[in-house]
Image (cartoon, rainbow, N blue to C red):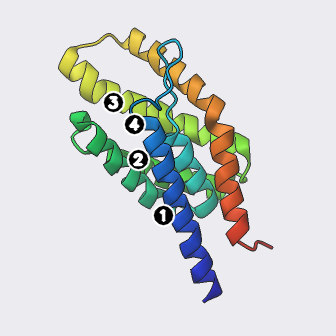
Amino acid sequence: MKEKKAFRWRMALYALVLLLFYVLQTARGTRLHVFGATPDLMPFFLAAIALFEGPYVGAAFGFAVGLFSTVNSGAEEGLMALYYALCCLGAGWFAARYMRRVYPTLLMCGAFISALKSLVVFFFYYALVYEAHSLSALAFAARNLAFSALFSPVVYLIIRKIHRRFTEET
């Protein structure tokens, strides 16, 4: 019974952090722009959830973030919910099987999720609708990924603190 209560508290705090990051990332006046790059904390947040809680919880949070993303921007037609859920499932499975719960693993999984998100958005929106060039999109995605990686330690430390607070590992 104690484990279920701790699990519920962890999920509630993760949801609160998700809401905080989502509002900071999408609200007017709080979005950070530097040389055209904007940080995207969601891939790193989802990688941290999948890293610490496993692939299924990561996929559930990925689906929720994808729904938030779809509500914020109708360009992807609901594809982001499926994309984030599958990426978190894969990242969580890979991290649970082959990696440890350390920051470089989060950085690798978050960068992978972010790069795949950039490719999905580019090909299903900009390339098909606007016929944009891939080289400029690649440079833009690289700038955003590098800028996002600067904030990823904060995400890692917050999720790790919540996980350690409510989990007794041997």
Residue 114 located left or right of residue 169: left
Q: Quadrant of the N terminus?
A: bottom right
Looking at the rendered structure, the kind of residue marked 4 is: Ala
Q: Which residue is mark 3?
A: 121
* Secondary structure beneath label 1: helix
Total label count?
Answer: 4
- Check disc 1 and give the amino acid type: Tyr
Q: Earlier in the sequence, mark 2 or mark 4?
A: 4
Q: Are marks 2 and 1 in contact (CB under 8 Å)?
A: no
Is 72 above or below relative to 143? below
Q: Nearer the viewer, mark 2 or mark 4?
A: 4
Residue 134 position (above or below residue 154): above
Which residue was labeled with disc 4? 27
115 up-or-down from 95: above or below: above
| Furthest-bottom residue in this view | 1
Q: Which residue is mark 2?
A: 84
Under circle 2, the secondary element is helix
Tag 2 or tag 3, which sits nearer the N-term? 2
Across and down, in percent, residue 131 comes to: 23, 14
> Which picture quadrant has residue 145?
top right
**Residue located beneath label 1 in the image:** 56
